[in-house]
Amino acid sequence: MNIRDTAKEFVSTTTKNIADLNKVSVDLDLQEESFMGAEGKEVRIKVVVVEGTKYRVPMSVVRDLKAILEVKPKLKEFKVLKQGTGMDTTYITMPLE
């Protein structure tokens, strides 16, 4: 296949953020992925896959969800709000229901 055909078929594989979802099921499979970062170091992230799209899950969301599940063990869905950008990003994990 030549470069023209390859370029036409190219689909970007960027990972979105869990805060992009309206709601998240607590039963989604959490997967680990790794890639080489800009500084040549291996970067590991947690992701969930929803309808074929990968969404990054910050560990702060997992930590907050653990605390929520201690109070609401039957929780089925939650929402994540993202505030800030870059290194100043914070996440708020809210139970739904």
Image (cartoon, helix red, strand yellow):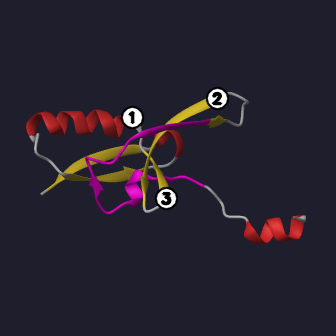
- What is the three-letter code of the residue carrying label 2? Glu
Residue at 73 percent across and 30 percent down: it is 40
**Looking at the picture, does residue 6 appear above or below residue 36?**
below
Mark 3 touching mark 2, by CB under 8 A?
no
Q: Residue furthest top?
A: 41
Q: Residue furthest right?
A: 2
Q: Tell me where the magenta segment starts and ends, as one range.
A: 14-34
Read off the residue under disc 1. Answer: 59
Q: Which mark is residue 53?
A: 3
Of mark 2 and mark 1, the one earlier in the sequence is 2
**Looking at the picture, does residue 24 appear above or below residue 35?**
below
Specify the quadrant that holds the C terminus.
bottom left
Read off the residue under disc 2. Answer: 42
Q: Identify the secondary structure beneath mark 3.
A: strand
Q: Position of residue 4 (x, y in %)?
A: 87, 70
Measured Cα–Cα span from mark 3 to mark 2 = 22 Å
- Near-viewer residue (93 or 78): 78
Measured Cα–Cα span from mark 2 to mark 1 = 17 Å
Q: Magenta segment: does it hold 18?
A: yes
